[in-house]
Image (cartoon, helix red, strand yellow):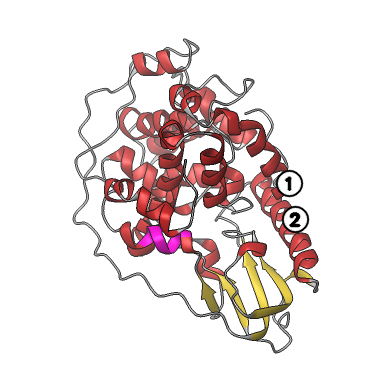
Amino acid sequence: MQQTARLTRADGLARLERFAPRLGRAYADTRNTDRGPSAEPTTTALSPHLRRRLLTEQEVVEAALFAHASTAAEKFVQEVVWRSYFKGHLETRPGIWADYRRGVVAGHERLERESGLRKAYGQAVAGGTGIDGFDDWARDLVEFGWLHNHARMWFASIWIFTLRLPWELGADFFMRHLLDGDPASNTLSWRWVAGLHTRGKHYLARADNIRRHTDGRFDPKGLEEAADPLDEPASRPVSKLAPADPSPRGDVALLIHLDDLHPESLPLDGARVVRVGGLLAHADGAADPVIEADRTAMADALARAAAHFQCPADIADEDFATGAPVVAPWAPVGPSADALPSVARLRRPWDEAIWPRSTRGYFQVKAAIPEILAACDVPIR
């Protein structure tokens, strides 16, 4: 994807409308193929919009099911639900995020001490390893802020098992540059590749698979295709999902953040929004294009909020609420949650339907998709 659309809701909706006819069997048949940054993606490339909820997961699922029978759109729906599963999983295992952040710090400390590791890391992030495909993806990530999902899996596998670099540093490299960098999806995807998410089950990039699914563009040599999965001392205990807060009645100030920029559809019940503030909390070390994308998306959300609620809307300062009780959409584990002050937190029905089921593997969520869609009143044909 050589150029990402401006991160506004209008642009996301336009892309969704264009791609909707391909969200059925065409998506299922081609989604694993990466044709390169100069070609139209085989996936929607809406992940930067979904990551910030300029578009909601529920509405893109509804668009797919409006355009296609449920059997045809099944794979697309499953992939969208997987994103929500990851968020719920990290929400009930916040220690994974804390350990990852400590791992990033420890990894950078090792780079200071170990010249060989520092050289290998520098070659990897600069696209200078000599590995066909991997080097291209490293450069594309920095230049365009996006990679096809299959390329992300190949890249992570080569990083971990061929180059033997710390997985946390690879996940951090992605978070700094991906326009759709999501704490849950990114952290847990890297752990899944490594064999830490589903213990003992890892993902090994294979040259024949890369060759086939890049239409022969890449044919890497020397990949480690027989490595054992990584291991770690023990699994993290499951934390009980904290309950959402009820929305206060009467006048409220709404605080929006980068994990939910569709304030028009929040479950505000009887509240009347009189002011809207925006909380910008970027990923640690975010590259300039990511910061600019965050700012663009926030500006779009504030403009829409001002029009929808007919009230002032701007980046929040300490006094933005002017005495009104403050409510916010739920911020899942990550920078927004770390920066969010103590306020009433509202959770969408979509998350309420998925997150409590996300304490173990994805397949118990996958099996419950019909119940999830019914709970959210998603029409199916």
What residue sits right under mark 1 in the picture? 10
Q: Is residue 87 visible?
A: no
Tell me what residue is drawn at x 68 percent, y 87 percent: 324
Indicate which disc, 1 or 2, sits on the residue closer to the N terminus: 1
Q: How many marks?
A: 2
- Identify the secondary structure beneath mark 1: helix
Name the chief secondary structure element in magenta.
helix
| Proximity of marks 1 and 2: CB atoms separated by less than 8 Å | yes
- Place of residue 185 in the rendered image (x, y in percent of width and height, measured from the top left): 44, 48
Q: Is residue 11 magenta?
A: no
Q: CA distance from mark 1 to mark 2?
A: 9 Å
Image quadrant holding the N terminus, namely: top right
Q: Is residue 312 above or below residue 197?
A: below
- Place of residue 6 in the rendered image (x, y in percent of width and height, measured from the top left): 73, 42
146 left or right of 350 in image:
right
Tell me what residue is drawn at x 50 percent, y 49 percent: 379
Q: Is residue 171 visible?
A: yes
Seen as rendered, the residue at the extreme bottom is 323
- Identify the secondary structure beneath mark 2: helix
* Crowd tier of the residue under label 2, counting other residues whose Cα lies within 10 Å: few below 14, some 14–19, many 20 or above: some
Tell me what residue is drawn at x 54 percent, y 19 percent: 35
Picture quadrant of residue 284: bottom right
| Type of the residue with mark 1 | Ala
Q: Which residues are magenta?
A: 350-355
Seen as rendered, the residue at the extreme top is 216
Q: Is 143 or 311 nearer to us in this picture? A: 311
Q: Nearer the viewer, mark 1 or mark 2?
A: 1
What residue sits right under mark 2 in the picture? 300
| Type of the residue with mark 2 | Asp
- Place of residue 46 in the rendered image (x, y in percent of width and height, measured from the top left): 59, 40
